[in-house]
């Protein structure tokens, strides 16, 4: 029995990702399975260093695992916006 992994991601350049996908497709991997691979992996946080890239990857994994939105909490909660509106009353 095959178990579908909850998350599959690939780090690499566009060229390397295309080459890997091409090889997998040539070996018979169905397109619907390939389309579930997150590539390149990670959230766009402007990461440049290896540590920052690791944080971006970990953030995407948690996002997928927990079903988050990826929206910054400050935007989602709008706490300050509500505070200033209430303080004007």
Image: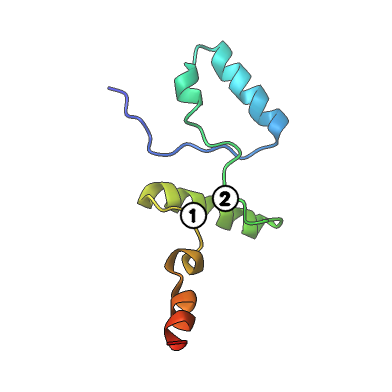
Quadrant where the image shows the N terminus: top left
Q: Residue at x 66, y 38 (%)?
A: 12
Identified at 63% across, 53% down, the residue is 53
Quadrant in the picture for the C terminus: bottom left
**In this rendering, is residue 87 above or below 71?**
below
Give above or below for 9 relative to 83: above
Residue that appears at 57% across and 37% down: 10
Residue 56 image position (x, y, % from top left) = 57, 54
Outermost left residue: 1
Instruction: Tell me the colour scheme of the image.
Output: rainbow
Q: Residue 42 location, x and y as percent?
A: 57, 47
Q: Are marks 2 and 1 in contact (CB under 8 Å)?
A: yes
Which disc number belongs to residue 43? 2
Q: SS for tag 1?
A: loop
Question: Taking 33 as reference, is 3 left or right?
Answer: left
> Which residue is at 36% across, 52% downward?
66
Badge 2 crowding class, 10 Å Cα cut-off, few under 14, some 14 to 19, many 20 or more, is some
What separation in Å lies between label 2 and label 1 (alpha carbons)?
8 Å
Q: Position of residue 63 (x, y in %)?
A: 44, 51
Give the mark count: 2
Q: Return the residue at label 1.
A: 70
Comparing 83 with 23, the one in front is 83
């Amino acid at each position: 029995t095959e178990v579908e992994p909850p998350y599959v991601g690939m780090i690499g350049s566009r060229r390397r990702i295309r080459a890997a996908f091409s090889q997998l497709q040539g070996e018979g991997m169905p397109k619907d399975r390939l389309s579930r691979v997150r590539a390149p992996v990670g959230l766009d946080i402007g990461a440049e260093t290896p540590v920052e890239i690791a944080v971006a990857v970990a953030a995407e994994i948690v996002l997928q695992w927990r079903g988050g939105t990826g929206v910054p909490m400050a935007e989602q909660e709008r706490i300050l916006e509500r505070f200033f509106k209430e303080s004007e009353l």
